Image (cartoon, helix red, strand yellow):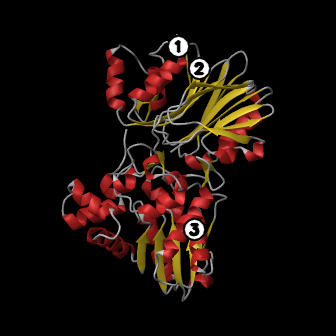
């Protein structure tokens, strides 16, 4: 995923920039960075966050930063920000992007005798490619529009100049950008949870494809929003922070409604409900309240010395971190019929280990309720479930086993994606059996859409049903 934060102020902005970026730490896995225009030059710093926290890595650098214009990023892939010299002037740039036609765009650039200096794991840095696309045009506005139109996938960006910040949301709005305001200036963020403790009030959402220019004196629209939007539904289910809102809809409230929908469609009455921490908690609270059963915490999470479980790039280390962080409370587990809520099942490896631990601790039954439909398509628009092959997805693996082929016809795939069909039930049963659960149910698509509260055509649901437009 990844997240960006920028601020423009009448005064020094470094404190707001530092803490604003830190409020996006949950969105990225590899790099953090910040860049500032000091009034004389651009200054930037980048650090790895794979095995440490943003604040501890960047706090020693703060003394070299000063200025009233700055941007920053938490990135799950490339090193950012980049500082670019061009015919448009010098600028710094950060992106939240997944460019599926990266190879074709790179070949086109080489055909124009362009060169690239940055690399990520031996490949062209996606943010530098975005900058190159911007520099093909005669203005920043036209350049950003050019990048948006040429990129397949998604790209949301902040571009820092000597005068202010250009903020541009992906042309389908798949990732959010929100503007905050206070007396001294403005901020723009992927996550609105960055605003309250820094004194900002949410001013407006940036629309799909819209380009906004922020200065300490005001906000200018440089390109109006496009008509169509497909914001990522998974932001509310998993990625987003509970205190954030997108399109005016709070994350925690959606998770509560998701859990309530799961409860209303359920035919069992467990001893209590629990959430797989942290993102399953809101779903489980909604389930428990609507089912009128207790909510308890048979798992607690130990975070002081362990990074997030999806951060390490090595799968063996990811599994180790996930296992070490969740501590079972055996006194709450023994002889209990426990129903867990979780945001999703991607591969199922960690969940299988958790279930085995619960039964080993004496659980009588372990039921699982998932807040979204079954993941059966890889994400084409964000860096979610893309580092693994399609067949690693638990749902897709079950389909392959049931059909005997890796890629069934689309009509067959749609039968698996549709709740209540015989194929869908067979897929869920195959996953349940592999995970050794007492029962397993997924959220119905119409209930998820209702919980979010936007029309389905404004939501990206590609990873569940394959639907999308580019």
**Marker count (numbered):** 3
Give the residue at x 50% y 75%: 264
309 in relation to 365, above or below: above
Give the residue at x 40% y 32%: 122
The residue indicated by pointer 2 is 91
Question: Residue 135 location in percent, x, y?
Answer: 48, 17
Question: Residue 353 location in percent, x, y?
Answer: 45, 71
Going by the picture, which residue comes out furthest to the top? 87
223 in relation to 205, above or below: above
Residue neighbourhood size for the residue with mark 2, other residues' Cα within 10 Å, grouped as few (<14), some (14–19), many (≥20): many
Q: Residue 326 carries which label?
A: 3
Q: Quadrant of residue 116?
A: top left
CA gap between label 3 and label 1 equals: 49 Å
Question: Which of these two is toward me, 300 or 251?
Answer: 251
Pointer 3 or 2: first along the chain: 2
The residue indicated by pointer 1 is 86
Pointer 3 or 1: first along the chain: 1
């Amino acid at each position: 995923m990844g997240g960006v934060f920028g601020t423009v102020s009448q005064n020094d902005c470094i404190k707001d920039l530092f803490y604003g970026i830190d409020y996006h730490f949950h969105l990225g896995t590899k790099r953090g960075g910040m860049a500032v225009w000091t009034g004389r030059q651009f200054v930037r710093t980048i650090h790895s966050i794979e095995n440490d926290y943003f604040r501890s890595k960047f706090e020693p650098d703060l003394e070299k930063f000063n200025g009233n214009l700055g941007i920053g990023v938490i990135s799950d892939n490339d090193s950012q920000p980049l500082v670019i010299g061009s015919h448009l002037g010098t600028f710094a740039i950060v992106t939240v992007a997944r460019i599926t036609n990266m190879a074709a765009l790179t070949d086109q650039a080489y055909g124009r005798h362009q060169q690239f200096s940055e690399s990520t794991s031996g490949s062209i840095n996606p943010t530098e490619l975005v900058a190159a696309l911007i520099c093909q045009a005669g203005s920043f506005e036209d350049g950003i529009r050019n990048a948006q139109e040429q990129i397949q996938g998604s790209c949301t960006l902040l571009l820092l100049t000597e005068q202010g910040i250009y903020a541009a949301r992906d042309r389908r709005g798949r990732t959010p950008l929100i503007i905050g305001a206070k007396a001294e200036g403005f901020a723009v963020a992927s996550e609105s949870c960055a605003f309250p403790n820094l004194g900002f009030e949410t001013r407006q959402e940036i629309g799909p494809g819209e380009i906004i220019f922020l200065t300490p004196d005001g906000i200018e629209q440089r390109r109006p929003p496009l008509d169509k939007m497909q914001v990522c539904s998974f932001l509310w289910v998993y990625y987003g922070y509970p205190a954030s809102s997108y399109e005016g809809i709070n994350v925690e409230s959606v998770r509560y409604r998701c859990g309530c929908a799961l409860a209303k469609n359920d035919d069992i009455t467990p001893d209590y409900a629990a959430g797989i921490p942290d993102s399953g908690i809101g779903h489980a609270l909604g389930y428990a309240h609507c089912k009128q059963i207790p909510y308890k915490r048979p798992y607690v999470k130990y975070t002081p010395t362990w990074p997030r479980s999806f951060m390490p790039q090595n799968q063996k280390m990811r599994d180790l971190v996930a296992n070490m962080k969740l501590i079972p409370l055996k006194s709450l587990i023994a002889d209990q019929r426990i129903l867990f809520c979780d945001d999703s099942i991607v591969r199922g490896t960690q969940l299988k280990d958790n279930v085995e631990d619960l039964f080993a601790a004496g659980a009588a039954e372990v039921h699982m309720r998932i807040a979204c439909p079954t993941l059966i398509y890889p994400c084409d628009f964000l860096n979610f479930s893309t580092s693994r092959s399609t067949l690693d997805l638990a749902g897709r693996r079950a389909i392959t086993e049931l059909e005997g082929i890796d890629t069934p016809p689309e009509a067959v795939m749609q039968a698996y994606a549709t709740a209540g069909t015989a194929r869908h039930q067979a897929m869920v049963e195959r996953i349940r059996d592999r995970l050794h659960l007492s029962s397993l149910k997924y959220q119905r698509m119409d209930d998820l859409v209702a919980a979010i509260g936007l029309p389905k055509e404004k939501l990206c649901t590609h990873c569940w049903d394959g639907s999308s437009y580019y």
